[in-house]
Image: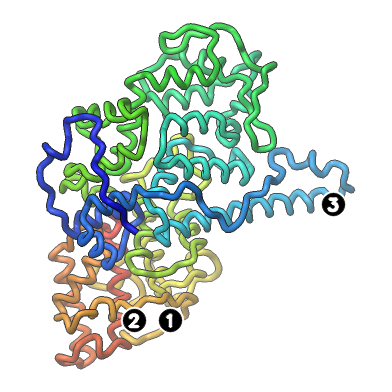
Amino acid sequence: MLGTCTTLLVVTSALSSAQAPALEWDAARAEHLWNRAGFGANTAAIERTVALGREAVVDELLRVEGWIEEPFYARKKPSGDLRKYVQNLPVEERDKRIAEMREEDRAQMADFLEWWVGRMLAGVEPLRERMVLFWHGHFTSSMAVVQGSYEMIQQNQLFRRRALGSFRELLFGVAHDPAMLIYLDNATSRKQHPNENFARELLELYTLGEGNYSEEDVREVARAFTGWTQENGHFKFDPGGHDGGKKHVLGVTGKLDGGDVLEIILKQPACARHLAHALLLYFEGREPEPERLESYAAGLRESDYAIEPFLRRLFLDPEFYSDEARANRVASPLDFLVGSARRLGVAQDASILLKGAKLLGQELFFPPSVRGWEGGRAWATGSSLILRGELAGLLLGRISRQALFGGPRDEADVPDDGAVAPMAASASPARKPGGSGRLDLNPRINLTQRLCRDGTPSDGELAHRLVAELLAIPAPEALTRSVEERLVAARTENELGAEPWSARPEIAEPLLRELAHEILALPEGQLD
């Protein structure tokens, strides 16, 4: 499966492999790579990553197929003003057919999103899917405005095709993308009344950043993109709606159209700097140092905006694995849910994770604004942390699907006050080992067997393994001691003596799941 390790493409000498300090390649750094370049990994995958070596694993992550097999194809369904499609129907049938068309479109969107999250869960081309999620937040569009699953799916597939390729080609693709043209009103922009929404976001959010363009540039760029529209989910250029006059954009004058504007933008030093900043911030979770940012921006310019060598360099950069860069950000809802499922080895239904992420404020295809999701500490609110704990319980089979997603709550599912309790008590209903609850999920997971796989670990060793298995940060000593104390107390309560936990899975498994639930509900469990 692995090919020969390729040589790191270094487009500037500032951080060349020859000058970089030696990096100890261990499990903590391997897990960091999987958390940021993918969606987490279990212990077996991390051990394999350590054994393969950093360069070989980075090569593997960057190797993607040129095509993507889909289990279905997206059908173009009516969108926008649906009444025009049913205007000839009898009055009593119109509303019914409109509702049916909307439901068909929602179902198609749901099918696609489950396929997408399914790829994340299965670890299929994890870096490619990570980049699709990044581009979805960078080049934002929303189903709430676009109102057509076909257009949103085509945009998502554009991100997938160009995920690790050329930003130049991706930028041109986005400028021609029907979902984007609808979302930012360029589909209705004509020379008589240029709409500035796409022009402004193109300059401010997608390419240059604030302070690197003027209001005149916004107006002139809007003129250049007049007539760039769409028809039935496909790009269309309307010559009659295009302003063919002279324009002045970022110091360049001429009869510029949208393509000319994109070339002008790509030549601006601020463009490479803006993109490098977005990528470094996303993957490292911290503001890059100015000198480092300039070095990576220079690499983008010299490679003509190739993303693959940028990421190869980043994932081989010792700074990426520094203590300051690891476990320093709050995981997004999808990262938390998909990552937890992958660490636990639970084959969850993708629809459950989509619903859970929506409850936590991250609904795919429905970003809250043109800026996408704020991310970072914005994910860590008091109510969201409580809900994350409940969702962790769902993954472990300790809280019912009904309790979270609708219907009456089962009193045995959550504490009376809804709070996440500290490790000294249960973060969800305290159950005696071996007890049962009214649950509708029975995840295929055996923590007892996994943690006792190489013999009979002591309670202290078992506690450390459980904490290390679930957290993206090094196992905190206080937390490990707390888990050990709970194991010792349970051993005494159940009169196990020196009997190994593996010999009593009917006691060990419910207890380990309860402890895993509590660990994932802690603030430390939200970091990646």
In the displayed structure image, the side of residue 415 where residue 527 appears, left or right: left
Instruction: Check disc 3 and report the residue beneath it.
Output: 93
Which mark's residue is nearer the viewer, 2 or 3?
3
Instruction: Provide residue 288's location: percent of width, then percent of height.
Output: 23, 34
Considering depth in this image, is 438 or 455 the residue closer to the camera? 455
Instruction: Check disc 1 and report the residue beneath it.
Output: 437
Dot 3 alpha-carbon crowd within 10 angstroms: few under 14, some 14 to 19, many 20 or more: few
Secondary structure at numbered mark 1: loop
In the displayed structure image, the side of residue 234 where residue 310 appears, left or right: left
Q: Are marks 1 and 2 in contact (CB under 8 Å)?
A: yes
Instruction: Check disc 2 and report the residue beneath it.
Output: 431
Which of the labelled discs sits on residue 117, or is there none? none
Residue found 13% across the figure and 49% down from its top: 23
- Look at label 1 and name its amino acid: Gly
Secondary structure at numbered mark 2: loop
Considering depth in this image, is 344 or 237 the residue closer to the camera? 237
Q: Name which of mark 1 and mark 3 comes first in the sequence.
A: 3
Residue 399 shows in this picture? yes
C-alpha distance separating marks 1 and 3? 47 Å
Instruction: Provide residue 266's location: percent of width, then percent of height.
Output: 40, 22
Dot 1 alpha-carbon crowd within 10 angstroms: few under 14, some 14 to 19, many 20 or more: some
- Look at label 3 and name its amino acid: Glu
Instruction: Provide residue 454's location: percent of width, then percent of height.
Output: 20, 80
- Scheme of colours in the image: rainbow
